[in-house]
Image (tube, rainbow, N blue to C red):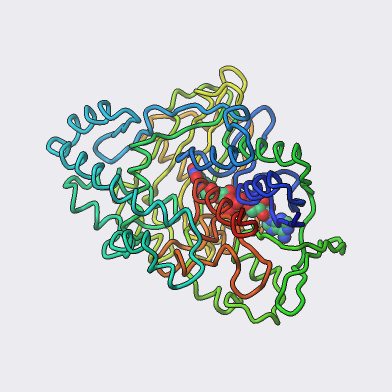
Amino acid sequence: MIKVSIIGAGPGGLAVGLLLAARGHEVDIFEKDDRVGGRSQAVTLGRYHFDLGPTFLMQVDVLRAVFAAADLALEDYVKLIPVEPLYDLIFKDNVFRPSRYRDKTHTELERLFPGELDHYERFMRDEATRYNKIAPLMQRPFEHWYDYFKPDALKALPHIVPFRSVHGKLKRYFEDANLIHAMSFQSKYLGMSAWKAPGFFTMLSYLEHAYGLYHVQGGLNKINDALADAIRALGGRIHLNTPVAQLLTQKRTVTGLQLENGETYPADCVVANADFAYFAHNLLDETLKIPHAPRKLHTMRYAISTYMMYLGLDKRYDLPHHTFVFADNYAQSVKTMTEKNTLDTDITVYVHNPSLIDNTLAPPGHSALYILVPVPNNDSQINWESYKITFKATILKRIEEKLGIYDIEQHIIEEKIMTPLDWEKNHHVYKGAVFNLSHTFSQLFYFRPHNAYRSLKHLFLVGGGTHPGSGLASIYQSAIITANLIDPK
Ligand SMILES: Cc1cc2nc3c(=O)[nH]c(=O)nc-3n(C[C@H](O)[C@H](O)[C@H](O)COP(=O)(O)OP(=O)(O)OC[C@H]3O[C@@H](n4cnc5c(N)ncnc54)[C@H](O)[C@@H]3O)c2cc1C
């Protein structure tokens, strides 16, 4: 039996905790917050319930595999609700509603993008082939440079080497600019621009179109509660309100951790789930010569951030589950944010209205609306304290113009706003870069901080900052990889 201490009860920490507890190991999870979930935690404002972060659940099989490894069935813990249509994509001149059903997407394509149906089918066929080659690399560790020369990597290499960006790749399939945006905006899930994200991330739109998206009754945060319940049932312990202050080491071997209250916990191994750059900056002793010393961390690339509004409204809004209002000049607006690190006035707004299909989130006749706007991370130096109210007005005006809803302000009963500063200060997210280290080729696979941390023995990583990357499915996958490295059963 291995004594494992985990720093953070985010989706990654919980998933690895469950996998290790199910194998009979002694699991202690230390979480600074009063609840589990991290960036995916529940937010409750009066009688309204929200997800703090993730609202898109895809590749559910990875999560099913985590539960199955503990001899449990995901569906016994959470109620999955398929989302249909996938989303409303509102462009300057039209609205595209792709579906989880291929024939419905075809009808939409013929209606809006005549001549592109064959292109779409070719893309989906090619992407299925490519995905089958790339997926194995997401399911195993990348600890050595020679991992690129294993047979599965050699098969996938032509597809993962970024000869083209996501946008560049899609331009070879589609002609209509809006359709290209519809199949590439998913790069935002990585906190990146489609013009910079490595081409193989076209797999994201493929996965959505091929396998659909899900909502979880009560919010995606219920997955964290389910994982936590299962861990406790197996004898694992989750210590809430228990921030970790530092890692304990002896001769480059991790021996445990020290809490902010001064207590020490010896452990056979430690798994860090806290945001990687925050962790490396704050919990590792500066005198340890590690490859991710602050100077190095500073030169790495980071994702964008988000401005968030959670609104409890005493009116039922018949908005779709997911709506994206694209900036009128989407390409320019993305470039301004990701390359110049400033905020364009022409913004893209994501509106999430889950209370329409889930009556547990708001009282009858009311809505729990979640609004997300991609914004630069804290390198931008935007003074959010003074700008956040002006920005709220800009967003509501955009919603008025594009969705024809003019009365949101009048119906607000509860409200919470989060800016990139809050992500950094309250959630320990370095630079407020909520989608973690950027997913450039130079920070992926072997070049991403390894699941078994290279230069400190008995230290492991899990979550969006390690292989294979950010997003819930990748994070659950990182938990499987890390658990197998700790206990290669
Ligand atoms: C706004 C937003 C929207 C997103 N949307 C989606 C989506 O739709 N779909 C999707 O798949 N993904 C989405 N993501 C990305 C990703 O899935 C989530 O961010 C996810 O929660 C990250 O999980 P994690 O395990 O890597 O880390 P985290 O969730 O950040 O968990 C880390 C944990 O460590 C804790 N911690 C930090 N410091 C300490 C310390 N010193 N001591 C103890 N504990 C500590 C934190 O409190 C936290 O609980 C979104 C993220 C955000 C922010």
Q: Is residue 316 above or below residue 169?
A: above
Horizontal relation, residue 104 to residue 278: left or right? left
Residue lying farthest to the top in this orientation: 364
Horizontal relation, residue 375 to residue 193: left or right? right
Residue occupying image coordinates x 47% and y 47%: 373
Q: Quadrant of the N terminus?
A: bottom right
Residue 293 seen in the current view: yes
Closer to us: 159 or 322: 159
Residue occupying image coordinates x 86% and y 60%: 261
Q: Is residue 180 above or below residue 252?
A: above
Horizontal relation, residue 435 to residue 106: left or right? right
Residue lying farthest to the front in this orientation: 489
Closer to us: 239 or 134: 134
- Could you tell me residue 40's position as x and y percent? 60, 44
Quadrant position of residue 273: bottom right
Residue lying farthest to the left in this orientation: 115
- Could you tell me residue 482's position as x and y percent? 59, 57
Residue occupying image coordinates x 50% and y 46%: 473
Horizontal relation, residue 176 to residue 340: left or right? left
- Could you tell me residue 14's position as x and y percent? 66, 47
Q: How many marks?
A: 0
Residue 307 seen in the current view: no
Residue occupying image coordinates x 37% and y 40%: 325
Quadrant position of residue 412: top right
- Could you tell me residue 97's position as x and y percent? 31, 32
